[in-house]
Image (cartoon, rainbow, N blue to C red):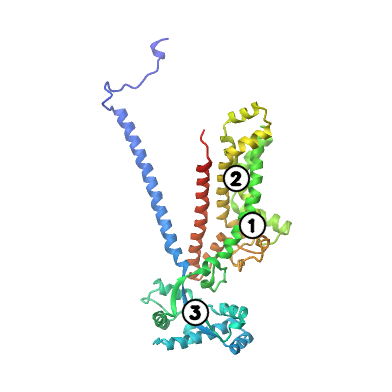
């Protein structure tokens, strides 16, 4: 062997205590890379803080509302006349506005609180009043305390979003109405409070943002997640065990694996079209039902859970399989008694992440009719929760964001906060399960 065949090394300084040019260049590159990494993390944190700040600033007002609080008295005669009117809810609104106008005079409100101005301030309260007395006719003629939401523009004015300076009158709110609002606030007739309707109510239509709630949509999302969990988990685990432990390695199984990987990248709206064609048009399942929504989301979630489950099964050391087989266990006993329990933490983590992904999907639900305005109430029974028309949190947020009234824009931000709470909770649970049950080899 000649010296020409020996590898040539870069000549360094004779002393290890002195950095030569090549070492300094390498250290400079490492420092530069660390600085770039730190800058990237800092930029990401800055955008995260901006995002969270924007969500909280725009969404927290949705959890409070400005209400008119009075002890209202409706006589039996007024009730019968209102029920005979063509526009019943408008008649109830007029009666309530007249009552509040008289109350304002009793409390010494100096501004001209006319019934017309109060109808603009109160918004759509007639439906709530009518529903109350139709359900409780024995309350006619008695004093009943009502806490009814004001219009969205009154709420914005009380919260400081609308200023007197630069304010222009419109059919929704006039300049003179601002004096009436200030007087009612001083008298304690208009107050702020927690908006329980938003947390536990249902969608109230396109003209009543004060009465809109996300509670019914939360229930719809819950029933959909039940369908996804019941169907996706056993199917995904069974498919993963077969492909990873029993299936022969041939072109057919290779095709299946490639198909699963490709399905994980398919846009969610494609699954919505598939659900519309198969489950509604072909199988004639009820439209806008959480059952159909759960089936569509199951198809979308299956590839994610299968990939996570296969990775968990593959992480179990082969020596455990060999040991079980060596003491006489069958292939089935080895998988179900040894491999599957050890892979369970990863399987649960993948399932929860898949459910969290499905919870935030909107496009496939819109295609099967689960838009926000169909969520007008809670289901009558547990079975009805799967078959009756309902919506989901993501679809309800989209519906509110697409409406013209600025009050719904605020509700949409509030719905995002609730949706994020669910998603953060589910992802945190996945991390806790992994750290609690994971075994390191």
Tell which circle, 2 or 1, labels the residue nearer the N-terminal end.
Answer: 1
Q: Residue furthest bottom?
A: 77
Q: What residue sits 47% from the left and 76% below the top?
A: 67
**Mark 2 crowdedness (10 Å alpha carbons): few <14, some 14-19, many ≥20:** many
The answer to whether residue 393 is left or right of residue 336 is: left
Q: CA distance from mark 2 to mark 1?
A: 18 Å
Does dot 2 land on a helix, a strand or a loop?
A: helix
Q: CA distance from mark 1 to mark 3?
A: 37 Å
Q: What residue sits 52% from the left and 66% below the top?
A: 199
* Label pair 1/3, CB-CB below 8 angstroms: no
The answer to whether residue 412 is left or right of residue 334 is: left
**How many numbered tags mark residues here?**
3
- Residue 197 in the image: above or below residue 131: above
Q: Position of residue 171 (x, y in %)?
A: 48, 80
**Mark 3 crowdedness (10 Å alpha carbons): few <14, some 14-19, many ≥20:** many
Tell which circle, 1 or 3, labels the residue nearer the N-terminal end.
Answer: 3
Quadrant assignment, res 368: bottom right
- The residue singled out by tag 3 in the image is 122
Q: Is residue 246 visible?
A: no
Return the residue nearer the eye: 21 or 209: 209
Q: Position of residue 329 (x, y in %)?
A: 67, 30
Return the residue nearer the eye: 181 or 215: 215
The answer to whether residue 228 is left or right of residue 425 is: right
Return the residue nearer the eye: 419 or 38: 419
Tell which circle, 3 or 2, labels the residue nearer the N-terminal end.
Answer: 3
Q: What residue sits 50% from the left and 64% below the top?
A: 412
- The residue singled out by tag 2 in the image is 305
Q: Position of residue 7 (x, y in %)?
A: 40, 18
- The residue singled out by tag 1 in the image is 293
**Mark 1 crowdedness (10 Å alpha carbons): few <14, some 14-19, many ≥20:** many
- Residue 422 in the image: above or below residue 186: above
């Amino acid at each position: 062997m000649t010296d020409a065949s020996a590898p040539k090394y870069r000549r360094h300084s004779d002393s290890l205590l002195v950095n030569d040019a090549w070492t300094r260049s390498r250290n400079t590159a490492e420092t530069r890379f660390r600085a770039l990494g730190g800058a990237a993390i800092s930029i990401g944190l800055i955008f995260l803080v901006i995002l969270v700040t924007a969500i909280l600033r725009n969404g927290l007002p949705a959890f409070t509302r400005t209400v008119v609080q009075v002890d209202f008295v409706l006589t039996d005669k007024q009730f019968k006349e209102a029920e005979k009117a063509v526009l019943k809810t408008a008649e109830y609104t007029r009666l309530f506005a007249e009552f509040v106008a008289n109350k304002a005079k009793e409390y010494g409100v100096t501004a001209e609180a006319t019934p017309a101005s109060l109808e603009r301030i109160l918004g759509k309260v007639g439906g709530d009043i009518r529903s109350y007395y139709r359900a409780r006719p024995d309350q006619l003629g008695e004093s009943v305390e009502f806490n009814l939401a004001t219009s969205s523009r009154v709420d914005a004015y009380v919260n400081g979003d609308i200023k007197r300076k630069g304010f222009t009158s419109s059919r929704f709110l006039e300049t003179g109405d601002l004096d009436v609002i200030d007087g009612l606030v001083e008298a304690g007739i208009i107050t702020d409070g927690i908006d329980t309707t938003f947390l536990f109510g249902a969608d109230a239509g396109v003209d009543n943002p004060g009465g809109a709630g996300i509670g019914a949509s939360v229930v719809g999302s819950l029933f959909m997640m039940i369908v996804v969990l019941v169907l996706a988990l056993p199917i995904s685990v069974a498919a993963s065990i077969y492909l990873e432990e029993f299936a022969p390695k041939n072109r057919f199984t290779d095709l299946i694996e490639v198909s699963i990987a490709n399905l994980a990248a398919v846009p969610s709206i494609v699954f919505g079209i598939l659900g519309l064609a198969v489950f509604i048009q072909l199988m004639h399942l009820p439209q806008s039902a959480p059952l159909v929504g759960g089936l569509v989301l199951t198809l979308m979630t299956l590839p994610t859970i299968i990939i996570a489950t296969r990775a968990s099964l593959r992480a179990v050391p082969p020596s455990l399989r060999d040991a079980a087989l060596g003491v006489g266990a069958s292939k089935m006993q080895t998988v179900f008694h040894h491999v599957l329990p050890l892979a369970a933490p990863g399987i649960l983590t993948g399932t929860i992440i898949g459910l969290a992904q499905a919870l935030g999907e909107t496009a496939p639900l819109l295609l099967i009719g689960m838009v926000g305005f169909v969520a007008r109430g809670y289901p009558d029974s547990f079975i009805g929760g799967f078959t009756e028309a309902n919506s989901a949190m993501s679809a309800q947020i989209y519906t509110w964001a697409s409406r013209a009234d600025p009050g719904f824009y605020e509700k949409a931000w509030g719905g995002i906060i609730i949706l994020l709470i669910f998603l953060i909770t589910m992802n945190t649970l996945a991390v806790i399960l992994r750290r609690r049950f994971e075994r390191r080899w």
